[in-house]
Amino acid sequence: MTAVLTPASAIGGHVQRSADPVEDAVREVFVAHYGQLAGWAAHLVGDRDLGHDVATEAFTRLLSHWERVDDPRPWLFATAANLVRDHWRKRGREAKAYERFQGGRPGPEEALPGPDQAQLLSVREAVEQLPDRLRLPVLLFYFADLSVAEVARQVGRSEGAVKRDLYDARSSLAATLEEAR
């Protein structure tokens, strides 16, 4: 860690300190960023409680990686984005397993004609459809408000490659959303 952090939480008029300076530093980062991270994750997964679970897991992982993390905020958002991606993958696998279980037979809710899927496509769903290489930079740059340099550090690519990924993602999203109109 390049900067020394001090705890920001005060209880009963005095600063709450632990014997572990790492725990104090993580507590300060938690106070500063947990709410935004939890809200961001909740928006991505469409579930407030799951968003809080994702944010909590990201902070748990931060604690165990603290010595190797230069800047906690982008690291937390990248970790949360990976957790969200894992959630989306799991949800996709569960849907496929359910379809196999049904044996291709339509369930009761599938038998009735539903709304036009083109009208239901949201930006979130369009982002979910992006390839992994494009999805994480989009989530970090547009949804977590990280700079191109911070995104490049988190995904392990050059800034030029991240800019190209963002350009490709915008083109793909524009085409997908235009088709849905």
Image (cartoon, rainbow, N blue to C red):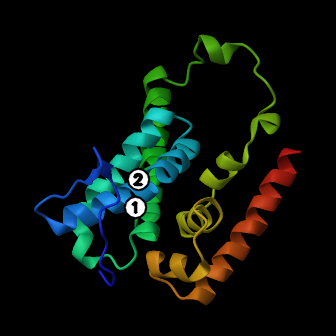
User: In which quadrant of the rendered image does the N terminus lie?
Assistant: bottom left
Q: Position of residue 151 (x, y in %)?
A: 53, 75
Density class for disc 2 (Cα within 10 Å; few <14, some 14-19, many ≥20) is some
Residue 62 shows up from this direction:
no
Q: Secondary structure at mark 2?
A: helix
For the view shown, which residue lies furthest in the left direction?
A: 19
Residue in view at x 37 percent, y 41 percent: 53
Q: Quadrant of residue 146?
A: bottom right
In the rendered view, tell whether residue 97 sits above or below residue 68: above
Left or right of 84 in this view: 144: right
Residue at which label 1 appears: 79
Query: Where's residue 161, x and y in %?
Result: 60, 85
Which image quadrant: the C terminus? Answer: top right
Q: Residue at x 52, y 42 (%)?
A: 42
Which amino acid, mark 1? Thr
Apparent side of residue 56 relative to residue 176 in the rendered image (left or right) = left
Q: Nearer the viewer, residue 113 or 16?
A: 16
Pick whichever, 124 or 30, lies toward us.
Answer: 30
Answer few, some or many: residues within 10 Å of disc 1's Cα (few below 14, many 20 plus, some between 14 and 19): many
Instruction: Determine whether label 2 and label 1 are within 8 Å by CB.
Output: yes
Q: Determine which residue is flagged by label 2.
A: 83
The structure residue drawn at horizontal position 26% and vertical position 53%, both measured from the top left corner, is 14
The reply, left or right, for residue 14 in relation to residue 34 is left
Q: Which quarter of the picture shows residue 70?
A: bottom left
Measured as percent of width and height from the top left, residue 152 is found at: 52, 81
Residue 118: horizontal and vertical position, in percent? 81, 38
Spatial CA span between label 2 and label 1: 6 Å
Q: Quadrant of residue 5?
A: bottom left
- Residue 35 appears anywhere in the view: yes
**What is the three-letter code of the residue carrying label 2?**
Leu
SS type, badge 1: helix
